[in-house]
């Protein structure tokens, strides 16, 4: 875009000598200030305006180029072109100043959004104890930085406690709900000895928050979530699912969903049933990997409308460590959707290494 004005003038100079005398292509220089305003600031647009007026005069007074005698330099049609170019230049300068102001404002907003995301979705540690962790977040819109998908990993005296969730809706309300949920989880993860109690405490915090916000959508401000506890010593994990896509266990010989069929309602809807949260226990041996994700992954569609085949893909990638796994998932989702994600995506990968040594470095093609 920055070279567009130069290409525009070069194309005009090529066309001017080969066009008939009665078709003076030089008049298109009137648009040069607007062309320049697309990619340059007001000072450059003002300079381009002066250059366009000068070039109009040169072409008008050069018989070999314009096919006209020198006397046409002040011919009334050319004088009108000079005036029009100057007026367009004034408008282009104003447009460029407005565009530069908007770009600076957008840059400031994005900077603030980046800070907010780092506070809301802090990068998870790459290693906690003997566990390897990696996270992924993809916004559906290129301009977006934060949304309603969330994840967290907290080391506690009870083990590493993981959370992934998806807030209903979009916009500032979803971000506010996600922030409230993460704050409640980060605090309660250290205090509640049992995973169902942790989920219940977060549920009560979310319900209280929704009531304080008021409005007509109190009952609709819900969050699907999965709570996972990975004890440091035993080779097992505990899972409480609150209406969220089930975690996926990845082993060298199998890839399967950890779905017991006893999922609780989403957070802020559990009060409607009043039933205690159910905890499921699964083996999590050395070498195993766990993938937590939001429904934006499995609801990604290709050009034909087919959903993303997550389990099928993971069966081909089950030997990859967490970082390589999420990088491969990231690229594949973009390729599958044609770079047109319809929903935000979050994922969290956790692996218990096969021994006490560090994992091998990622492969070059990871």
Image: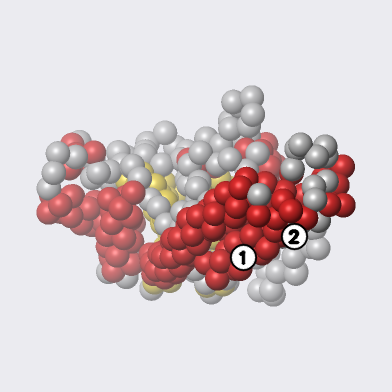
Q: Please indicate whether residue 184 sits to the left or right of residue 318 in the image.
A: left
Disc on res. 58: 2
Residue that numbered label 1 is attached to: 50
Q: Residue at x 54, y 58 (%)?
A: 86
Q: Please indicate whether residue 146 sits to the left or right of residue 39 in the image.
A: left
Residue 208 rendering spot, x and y as whole percentages: 15, 53
Q: Residue furthest front?
A: 71
Q: Residue at x 50, y 46 (%)?
A: 140
Closest to the observer, 319 or 41: 41
How has the structure been colored for display?
secondary structure
Residue 224 rendering spot, x and y as whole percentages: 36, 44
Give me the C-alpha separation between circle 2 and circle 1: 12 Å
Residue mark closest to the camera, 2 vs 1: 2
Mark 2 in CB contact with mark 1 (< 8 angstroms): no
Residue 247 appears in the figure: no
Disc on res. 190: none
Q: Quadrant of residue 110?
A: bottom left
* Mark 2 neighbour class, 10 Å CA radius: few under 14, some 14 to 19, many 20 or more: some
Residue 226 rendering spot, x and y as whole percentages: 40, 49
Closest to the observer, 336 or 84: 84
In the rendered image, which quarter contains the N terminus?
A: bottom right
In the rendered image, which quarter contains the C terminus?
A: bottom right
Q: Quadrant of residue 163?
A: bottom left
Closest to the observer, 249 or 33: 33
SS label for mark 1: helix
Residue 198 rendering spot, x and y as whole percentages: 29, 58
Q: Residue at x 80, y 40 (%)?
A: 21
Closest to the observer, 292 or 88: 88
SS label for mark 2: helix
Q: Residue at x 74, y 43 (%)?
A: 24
Q: Please indicate whether residue 168 sits to the left or right of residue 323 in the image.
A: left
Sequence-wise, the earlier of marks 2 and 1 is: 1
């Amino acid at each position: 875009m920055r070279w567009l004005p130069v290409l525009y003038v070069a194309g005009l100079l090529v066309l001017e000598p080969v066009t008939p005398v009665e078709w003076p292509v030089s008049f298109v220089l009137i648009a040069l200030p607007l062309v320049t305003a697309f990619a340059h600031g007001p000072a450059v647009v003002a300079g381009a305006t002066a250059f366009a007026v000068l070039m109009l005069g040169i072409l008008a007074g050069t018989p070999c180029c314009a096919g006209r005698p020198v006397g046409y330099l002040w011919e009334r049609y050319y004088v009108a072109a000079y005036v029009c170019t100057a007026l367009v230049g004034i408008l282009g300068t104003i447009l460029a100043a407005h565009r530069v102001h908007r770009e600076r404002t957008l840059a400031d907003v994005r900077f603030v959004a980046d800070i907010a995301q780092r506070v809301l979705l802090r990068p998870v540690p790459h290693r906690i104890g003997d566990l390897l962790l990696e996270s992924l977040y993809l916004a559906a819109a290129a301009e977006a930085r934060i949304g309603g998908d969330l994840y967290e990993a907290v080391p506690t005296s009870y083990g590493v406690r993981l959370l992934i969730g998806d807030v209903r809706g979009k916009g500032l309300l979803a971000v506010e709900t996600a922030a409230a949920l993460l704050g409640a989880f980060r605090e309660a993860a250290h205090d509640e000895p049992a995973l169902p109690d942790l989920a219940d405490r977060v549920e009560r915090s979310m319900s209280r928050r929704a009531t304080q916000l008021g409005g007509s959508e109190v009952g609709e401000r819900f969050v699907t979530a999965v709570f996972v506890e990975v004890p440091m010593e035993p080779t097992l994990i505990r899972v409480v699912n609150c209406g969220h896509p089930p975690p996926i266990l990845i082993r060298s010989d199998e890839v399967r969903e950890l779905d017991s069929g006893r999922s609780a309602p989403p957070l802020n809807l559990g009060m409607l049933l009043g039933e205690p949260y159910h905890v499921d226990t699964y083996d999590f041996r050395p070498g195993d990997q766990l993938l937590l994700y939001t429904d934006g992954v499995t609801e990604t569609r290709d050009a034909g409308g087919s959903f993303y085949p997550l389990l099928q893909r993971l069966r081909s990638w089950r030997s990859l460590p967490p970082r390589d796994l999420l990088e491969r998932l990231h690229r594949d989702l973009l390729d599958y959707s044609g770079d047109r994600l319809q929903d935000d995506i979050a994922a969290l990968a956790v692996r218990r290494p096969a021994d006490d040594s560090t994992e091998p470095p990622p492969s070059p093609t990871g």
